[in-house]
Amino acid sequence: AKADEKTERHLNPLSVLHRVDELLAEDSIIVADGGDFVGSAAYIMRPRGPLRWLDP
C-alpha cells in the first residue's frame, strides 16, 4: 500500500495521517484544510465524536 512505501528524502503523507490518527486523544478536535491532503485525511482519520472534525 502507498502508506507503507519507504522514502528517505520526504515524509509519506499517508503514513503521517495514520500515525497522527493513532496518537489522537479521545477529546481531540481535528482542523484540516489543504485540498488533496484533506481528502486523504478524511478517509484515514477518525473524528472522535460529533463536532470533532472542522474543515473550514
Image (cartoon, rainbow, N blue to C red):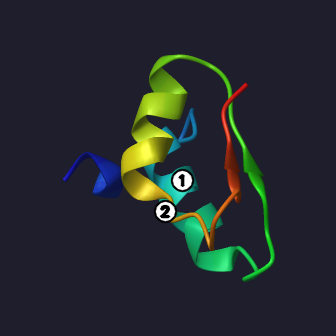
> Which mark, by number, is residue 18?
2
Please give the name of the residue rendered at 69% of the width and 36% of the height, measured from the top-left corner: 32
> Which mark, by number, is residue 50?
none
Q: Answer with the quarter of the image where residue 33 lies.
A: top right
Q: Are marks 2 and 1 in contact (CB under 8 Å)?
A: yes
Please give the name of the residue rendered at 31% of the width and 58% of the height, measured from the top-left corner: 4
- Image coordinates of residue 18 in percent, x first then y, are 49, 62
Q: Amino acid at mark 1?
A: Leu
* Residue 27 in view of the camera: yes
Q: Answer with the quarter of the image where residue 51 lies.
A: bottom right
- Quadrant (top left, top right, bottom left, bottom right) of the C terminus: top right
* Residue 12 in view of the camera: no
Query: Which residue lies most toward the left here?
Result: 1
CA–CA distance in space, label 2 to label 1: 4 Å
- Image coordinates of residue 49 in percent, x first then y, are 63, 72
Along the viewing direction, whichever of 40 and 13 lies nearer the viewer: 40
Helix, strand or loop at disc 2? helix
Crowd band around label 2 with a 10 angstrom C-alpha radius: few (<14), some (14–19), many (20+): some
> Which mark, by number, is residue 17?
1
